């Protein structure tokens, strides 16, 4: 279970031209809830505040205001406990390429408090599911982006997290691997995990997400099932919602 | 603490995967110093042997032949060459000859009249062969002078001892071991500082800014490990590498110098005394106390590197920020080698420099317990403070995410 209550996040950035410091509100009063066994899709254009929101849920960033709970654990008060409950994957994350997948998974299992042998067994099982078991003992230096992404997915799920946060999980993956990831998301849903996925791939959202939240300019617009969203905007696909949202950006979203 | 040890394990595992870095960090110093010192020794002894085996080329202007004949009579050490055309000084600088001797024309007559005769000798102080030629000439002249004096005394019917009123015997009263200890104490802190800092710097950058650049730091931070433990783990890694680098370099250097002195000084009493002196001075307690000082000093440097690495956005920025640190360390090292610094009353209270002073005093057998403890405590407090700052830095989102 994930619960965000009136979450705000502001960044201080330096304007390179004027050298003045600017305050940018990346997230403005987002409240949402993701129940166990639910896949929540987070949509929005680049820079809308999706990744910041996901990082805050993953305990990598602190909200300035509001409260985030992961399975009842406050991410600010008990960040370590909260992170132990979360499996986080992002395109910003990379693997330690000098290691083999087996070594990496064993080590990260230990970081997450899982016994090294158990972590290795679970890791190999995940690699098998992702079709990477044959590469378990090969150094990752020569791996493709997709192969590294698969190892990252295994790394994120290694400690059997109750909450899974995937920030653009299919980026850089071929169609077949992307389908494997979608299947994995469905398995996680069936296992009763709370899953949040951020993506630009609309068919993926339509295929797996139970509910969708659209983030625009730091605020959450529309938190409903994909079907309800389509009906509300009077369009046939989520792609069109996205375009309308982008067009509305100049005049503001009501 | 378990998390910090896991991070330490991860860092060493990563290092163990890079054979080239392992070789250059741990094996290269073991090969390099013996090789350099052996080559230097061989080149030096070969050069000295070559010079000693060749007679010095001397141009002699001595119309009355009071010395020309003497030098010509010793072909093993002197070869008389004709005066080169043009400037004789330039000819010596061009190494066409080693020495030019000019004796006044009336030398024989003056000698016969028991008067003092004048002569001039030209040599090049910057050239070892020319300096050797001068030494040889002075030796030869000394012997000849003695013969002339004896002859004069005899002609006057005086005792030969008239010209030798004193027979002086010089004996060494100082402790060679202490002398060597003072010498070691003056440059050991410099070596320790530079080796610890330079040895750990690149590894520290790889483990901090490098992790940011490669996108692996976030995956580490997304685990349930407390950030304090991540920082301490990385600190321990940088510290370990610094200490290991310094120890390996020092051991290799000490072994090479020891071998050089033992080999070169087979018949040299001073060299043998120096080796014995070092052995007597480097007692387990002195080495142990020195190592105890190295620990906070290493932690201080590791923290400095950690702080620079965490603040930087990438490895280039980190290198640019941390490289000037080498010059600061060199400057501190040079200062710690300066003579007379042990007399500065305020120095025991200056962080880092007081470590140099304490090591210096340990090796010169002038250790001051209070000053030692002040240096140890100050450096530990400073290192602790910097660890706290590093942890706070890593907790700052701006240090982790590029905003």
Image: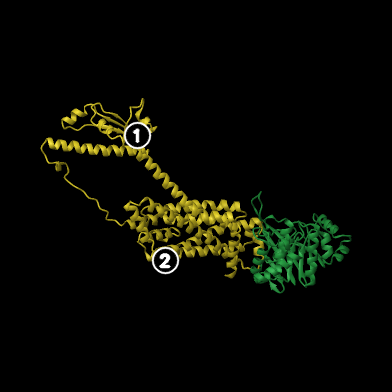
Chain colours: A green, B yellow
- Measured as percent of width and height from the top left, residue B379 is found at 47, 63
* Disc 2 element: helix
Residue at the left extreme of this rendering: B157
Identify the image quadrant of residue A75.
bottom right
Q: Residue at x 40, y 43 (%)?
A: B46
* Disc 1 element: loop
- Measured as percent of width and height from the top left, residue B196 is found at 49, 57
Say whether residue A82 is visible. no
Find residue B98 and name its label.
1
Say whether residue A117 is visible. yes
- Measured as percent of width and height from the top left, residue A55 is found at 70, 63
Q: Residue at x 64, y 51 (%)?
A: A19
Label whose residue precedes the other's in the sequence (2 or 1): 1
Find residue B373 and name its label.
2
Of residue B205 and residue B27, the one placed in the foreground of this image is: B27
Which part of the image, by quadrant, shows the C terminus of chain A? bottom right
User: How far apart are labels 2 and 1 at the CA level?
Assistant: 57 Å
* Left or right of B233 in this view: B170: left
Dots 2 and 1: beta carbons under 8 Å?
no
- Measured as percent of width and height from the top left, residue B184 is found at 39, 56
**Chain to which mark 2 belongs:** B
């Amino acid at each position: 279970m994930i619960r965000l209550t009136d979450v705000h996040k502001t960044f201080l950035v330096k304007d390179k031209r004027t050298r003045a410091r600017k305050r940018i509100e990346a997230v403005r009063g987002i409240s949402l809830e993701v129940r166990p066994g639910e896949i929540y899709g987070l949509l929005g254009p680049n820079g809308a505040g999706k990744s910041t929101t996901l990082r805050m849920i993953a305990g990598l960033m602190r909200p300035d205001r509001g409260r985030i709970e992961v399975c009842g654990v406050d991410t600010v008060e008990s960040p370590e406990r909260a992170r132990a409950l979360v499996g986080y994957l992002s395109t910003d994350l990379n693997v330690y390429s000098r290691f083999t997948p087996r070594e990496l998974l064993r080590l990260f299992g230990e970081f997450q408090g899982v016994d090294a042998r158990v972590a290795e067994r679970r890791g190999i099982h995940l690699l098998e599911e992702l079709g990477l078991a044959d590469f378990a003992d090969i150094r990752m230096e020569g791996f493709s982006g997709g192969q590294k992404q698969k190892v990252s997915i295994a790394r994120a799920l290694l400690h059997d997290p109750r909450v899974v946060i995937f920030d653009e999980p299919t980026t850089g993956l071929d169609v077949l691997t992307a389908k494997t990831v979608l299947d994995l998301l469905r398995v996680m849903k069936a296992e009763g995990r709370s899953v949040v996925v951020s993506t630009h791939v609309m068919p993926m959202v339509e295929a797996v997400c139970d509910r969708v939240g659209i983030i625009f300019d730091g605020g959450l617009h529309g938190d409903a099932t994909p079907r309800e969203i389509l009906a509300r905007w009077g369009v046939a696909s989520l792609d069109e919602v996205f375009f309308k949202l982008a067009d509305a950006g100049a005049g503001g979203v009501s | 603490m378990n998390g910090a040890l896991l991070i330490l394990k991860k860092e060493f595992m990563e290092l163990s995967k890079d054979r080239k870095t392992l070789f250059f960090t741990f094996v290269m110093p073991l090969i390099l110093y013996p090789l350099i010192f052996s080559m230097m020794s061989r080149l030096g002894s070969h050069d000295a042997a070559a010079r000693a085996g060749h007679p010095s080329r001397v141009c002699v202007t001595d119309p009355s032949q009071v010395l020309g004949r003497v030098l010509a009579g010793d072909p093993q050490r002197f070869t008389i060459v004709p005066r080169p055309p043009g400037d004789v000084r330039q000819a010596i600088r061009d190494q066409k000859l080693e020495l030019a001797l000019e004796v006044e024309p009336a030398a024989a007559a003056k000698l016969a009249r028991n008067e003092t005769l004048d002569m001039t000798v030209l040599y090049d102080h910057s050239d070892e062969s020319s300096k050797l030629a001068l030494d040889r000439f002075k030796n030869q002249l000394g012997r000849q002078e003695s013969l002339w004096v004896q002859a004069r005394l005899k002609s006057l019917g005086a005792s030969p001892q008239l010209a030798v009123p004193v027979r002086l015997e010089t004996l060494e009263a100082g402790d060679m071991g202490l002398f060597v200890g003072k010498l070691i104490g003056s440059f050991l802190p410099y070596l320790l500082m530079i080796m610890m800092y330079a040895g750990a710097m690149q590894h520290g950058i790889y483990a901090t800014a490098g992790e940011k650049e490669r996108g692996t730091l976030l995956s580490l931070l997304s685990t349930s490990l407390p950030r304090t433990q991540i920082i301490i783990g990385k600190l321990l890694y940088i510290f370990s590498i610094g200490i290991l680098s310094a120890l390996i370099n020092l051991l290799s250097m000490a072994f090479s110098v020891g071998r050089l002195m033992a080999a070169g000084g087979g018949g040299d009493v001073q060299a043998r005394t120096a080796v014995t002196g070092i052995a007597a001075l480097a007692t387990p307690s002195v080495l142990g106390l020195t190592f105890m000082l190295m620990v906070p000093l290493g932690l201080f440097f590791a923290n400095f590197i950690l702080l620079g690495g965490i603040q930087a956005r990438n490895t280039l920025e980190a290198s640019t920020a941390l490289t000037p640190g080498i010059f600061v360390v060199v400057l501190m090292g040079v200062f710690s080698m300066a003579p007379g610094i042990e007399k500065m009353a305020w120095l025991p209270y200056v962080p880092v420099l007081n470590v140099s002073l304490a090591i210096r005093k340990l090796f010169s057998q002038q250790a001051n317990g209070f000053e030692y403890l002040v240096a140890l405590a100050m450096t530990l407090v400073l290192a602790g403070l910097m660890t706290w700052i590093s942890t706070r830095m890593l907790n700052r989102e701006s240090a982790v995410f590029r905003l």
